[in-house]
Every structure is written in C-alpha cells, then in structure tokens.
Image: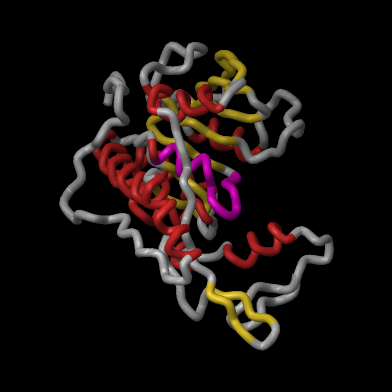
Amino acid sequence: MAAPAAGGPPAAAANGDWFDTVDRWRVGAPDAFPEPGCSGPGLGWSGGGRTSPVHDVGLYVPINPLAARRPHNGFGFVNYVLVLGDRGPGASDGAPSPMTAWLLGGLPRLDVVVVENATASAWRSRALRGQVAVDTRIDLWRLMAYASVMIDLRPGALLARECVESLRYGTPVVVPAGTAAAHLAALGGGLWYRDPSELLACVDAIVDADTRDVLGAQGQAAADRLYGDPAAFVGRVAAAMAGSAPPAVDPFPSRRSPNRRPVPNRPDRPGR
C-alpha cells in the first residue's frame, strides 16, 4: 500500500479494495481516532490542487434493550467470560484455535463462552460443556448482556461494532492494543493487551466485581453518547452537509465516579 499523501488518503490499493486502504490508513494508536464531530486540516482528501475537509460524523450503532431482559436460552449460567474467536467463517474444525485454547487453559476456574462460526461453545478448563447456535443478532446481544467481560480477539478495523454493542449493554471489553477497539477501551470501558500474558492479566483484573462495574458504567456512558444517540448523529450529518463542522461529542460529560446504569428493562444479573 502506498504511503498517504500529506493531508490526504493513501493511494488506492492495488486490488481496488478502497475500504481496506482506508482501514489501514485510519488504524493506529488509540489517540489516532477522532471522536464524532472532529474536523480540521489534518482530516482531508487532497486532489486537484485543493483539499476538501472531512468531517467525522461518527455512526449510530443500534442495540435492542429487550435482548437484556433474559439470558440466552442455551445456557443456565451468567457472568461468564465471552470470547469472540480469531478465525474467519468456516475456519473452525470443532477444536478451539491455538489462541483460544491457550486462553481456556489460563482461566481454569472461570466459565468461558466462545463464539465462532455462529456457534457458542461453553468451556471450563478446556472441557467442552455444551454448544448452542447463535442464529440472530439478538442471540449475540443476549450473550453480551450477561457476560462479565467480552474479549474480542479479532475486532473490526474501522468500528469494532461488537465492542461498541457490548459496551452499550454495560459489559466491559478486553481487546488487542493498536486497534480501533483499543480506542473504545481507552474511553474507560475496558483494557487492551499486547501479548498473551497481558491478556490474562486484563481478564483477572476485570472479573473483580468492583472493577467490572466501574469499567462497565464508564464504557456504557461513553458508547451511548458516541454511538447510541440517533438524533445527535443526524445532527452531525446535517451540519457536515451544510459545510460546517459538526458539534464535538464529549464522551465524559461528568467526571464524577460513575454509578452503573443498567440497560432499560434488564434485571440485575445474579452475582453482580
């Protein structure tokens, strides 16, 4: 991939995958991601002797609060560690990936639910306890809402949608460093790791009830303000189309110690 020109995007990828080019341009350290409403000379497309400003209007990421009213029907326990696998569709042979197997071995006393290839597998100390299908987005949201923490081993490059959704349900995340998801964690909703040992340390820290509740509340508040307000999103788009910079969004409207705000209609999870 060609290096980006000053003030503009990189040249198109050889295979014509524009989104892959943009992904690689935008992904970097957590502070490289502007919040919705940011604009300026550093964000622009250059071409034809002029630079057109780019306004980051963010994105609206919807969830269904009703998904949090009860756990997934396939499991009779909650407060598990939810893991989104690191392999693409069709890559599973029934056994966990090497990274997932290492993680299962490092968390022998915790219930772990691994989601891969539209299947949720319940594990405890490398012993498979059962599997259920994840047929709909509601199924995945229910698994998110009743987890103690969600680990995304391969988050999306631009948005990390599943991490946003998990935070909107009040469940903190653990993600790889240097990804878009690490930016979400840096907003106060989780932790990020650089190697497997740090991954285990992050999980050990978050399963502590007090730490989990604080990170869950912080992450939920920030995710709701950045990605959960459709009226604000429409307003930012309208401002950008009118040629003015959209209003900035403060993910931390209050610096007071947060109190956990449950998703509407969701009963408190046992053991929390």
* Residue at image location 51% in from the left, 56% down from the top: 177
Q: Is 50 positioned to the left or the right of 88 in the image? A: left
- Give above or below for 153 relative to 262: below
Residue sitting at 74 percent across and 73 percent down?
A: 11
Magenta part of the protein: which range?
A: 154-167
Q: Is residue 132 above or below residue 54?
A: above
Residue 262 on the magenta span? no
Residue 165 at x, y percent in the picture: 46, 38
Residue 263 as seen in the image, left or right of residue 195: left
Q: Farthest residue toward the bottom?
A: 49
Report the residue that reaches farthest toward the right: 15
Residue 61 screen position, x and y as percent: 47, 42
Quadrant that contains the C terminus: top left
Q: Quadrant of residue 261?
A: top left
Q: Quadrant of the N terminus?
A: bottom right
Considering every residue shown, the one lying at the far left of the view is: 256
Residue at image point 42% right, 70% down: 245
The quadrant holding residue 204 is top left
Asked if the magenta segment contains residue 158, the reply would be yes
Residue at 81 percent across and 61 percent down: it is 16
Q: On the rendered structure, is 160 left or right of 236? A: right
The colour scheme used to paint the residues is secondary structure
Q: In the rendered view, tell whether residue 110 sits above or below residue 2.
A: above
Task: Decide which of 129, 55 is in the foreground and name it.
Answer: 55
- Number of numbered callouts drawn: 0
Depth check, front residue: 263 or 271: 263
Q: List x then y, in percent, for residue 110.
A: 43, 26
